[in-house]
Amino acid sequence: MTVATTKTIPEFTTRVLPAKAVKLEFTSKLEDDGFVATGADKQWIEESRIQLRMNNCVGIPTETVYGLAANALDESAVRSIYRAKSRPSDNPLIVHISSVHMLRSLYHLPAAEAEAEADTGRPFLGTDNAESEGHEMREVETKMRQAELHDIQNGGDGVWPEIPRAYHDVIRKFWPGPLTLVLPRPACIPMVVLGNHGDTVAFRFPEHPVARAVISSCGLPLAAPSANASGRPSPTSAAHVLHDLNGRLPLIVDGGDCDVGVESTVLDAFSSNAYVDGQQLSPCILRPGGVTFEQLFALGGVWEKTRVYKKHFTSKELELNPTTPGMKYRHYAPSVPVHVVLPTNAFAAAAAASEDKNTSAQQNDRHLAMQSHIDKLTKDIGDSGRLGVIAVRGPSGKMPEFTASSGCQLVVHYVDDAKHLAHSIFALLRLLDEIEHVDAILVEGVDEADEGMAVMNRLLKAATSHMF
């Protein structure tokens, strides 16, 4: 494993182009990626297309967090992502596509090694580009039709034969959206995308219209981890990207703040990790995120057997050779210590029992516990310091009043519930660290249900200490 450094990064004058005053209409939800753009602020479409086809990185908004995107078919382009982020080389990347058609096409392209030797360049896979980019894409289309016919001849329905059938229902339900699927590696994807190990690739079809339009316009699948310096809190605004990566990429597309606020859920229903005793399919969530465990469970059938990594099972092999980001290294940490108050059973009950007559008393217990930790941390920080606090209002909506036991100044931010915390956690960590300049941060944890599972996954990775 190597960690790419910033010393060899070309110097860029990073531009930020607005993409807020534009209306994007796509020709279909899943199957193709043609789109029409109307309104102002359309320069980003052509500019991002140019940069990505030149194998440069571009910062793009998604519904989860901002991504640092580059051509997933080109090894040198992918390596530029690792350099810009100073990302460990064995930490794999998620590949983003703009349609099921693009995903299927990848399984019919030449192997990455053969293409590199031939140096013939890649076909562009956007629907609008297929005919104009030459005969190679027409050959891919023919191979896709042949795959459909072969599937029918073998008793299948001819629908998406390149994609494992176990995923078809979740694709129809949750794509485009904050869900990443572990799939067999197409031969055209270079091994550097996988962190140079394994035989699977994590794919996502983002819902954010700007992200989808960027991918479709350039006609390339894009490898895109979060657009932050490695280990830092993920960026949920263009300003966060500029703060971390200014000068390390030529372009950031500003689509506004992200809606979800935490990364996508990574789901495996294909590899050996998804099988119990090597035979029974039991899908696993490798990273909780925007699609919840409860939403997957509600699909019924095999999805009622869904497991969560490090909650229902562990794997030394996954720890050493992760198949997806967010599994091996410390992530999401600001420059100051983060202390997380883990919810007790009483805390969880207070969050769930909004109409219970004891809710106010339970909520008061939570706030007393937070005050106790504030007293300890403010004493440790000292009179001239500043302590950042992120607290949950709870069912009553009442904002607790915290006090410092010394001259230490408190900087308190409140969230309504787990969903609100998921949406704002990275932005609040950055605000407290980079703008309000606190010396430490105390965060009130939430129950690991629904969005709470993703929030606690991120907080525990960012935390310096866990408190009870």
Image (cartoon, rainbow, N blue to C red):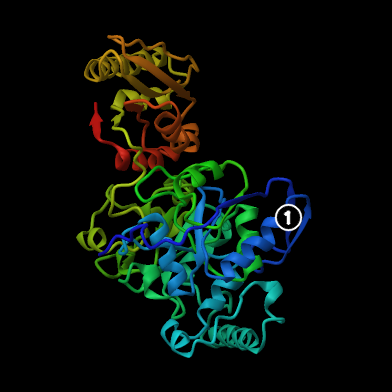
| Picture quarter with the C terminus | top left
Residue 11 versus residue 306: which sits nearer the camera? Answer: 11
For residue 118, above or below residue 241? below
- Res. 334 in view: yes
Q: Which secondary structure lies at badge 1?
A: loop
Residue that appears at 30% across and 43% down: 461
Left or right of 18? Residue 342 is left
Residue 154 versus residue 227: which sits nearer the camera? Answer: 227
Q: Which percent across, then down, holds residue 433?
A: 39, 32
Residue 133 versus residue 242: which sits nearer the camera? Answer: 242
Residue that appears at 70% across and 63% down: 28
Question: Which residue is labeled 1 in the image?
Answer: 42
Q: Count up the numbered dots.
A: 1
Query: Which residue type does callout 1 highlight?
Result: Lys
State which quadrant residue 465 falls in.
top left
For residue 119, above or below residue 406? below
For residue 154, above or below residue 342? below
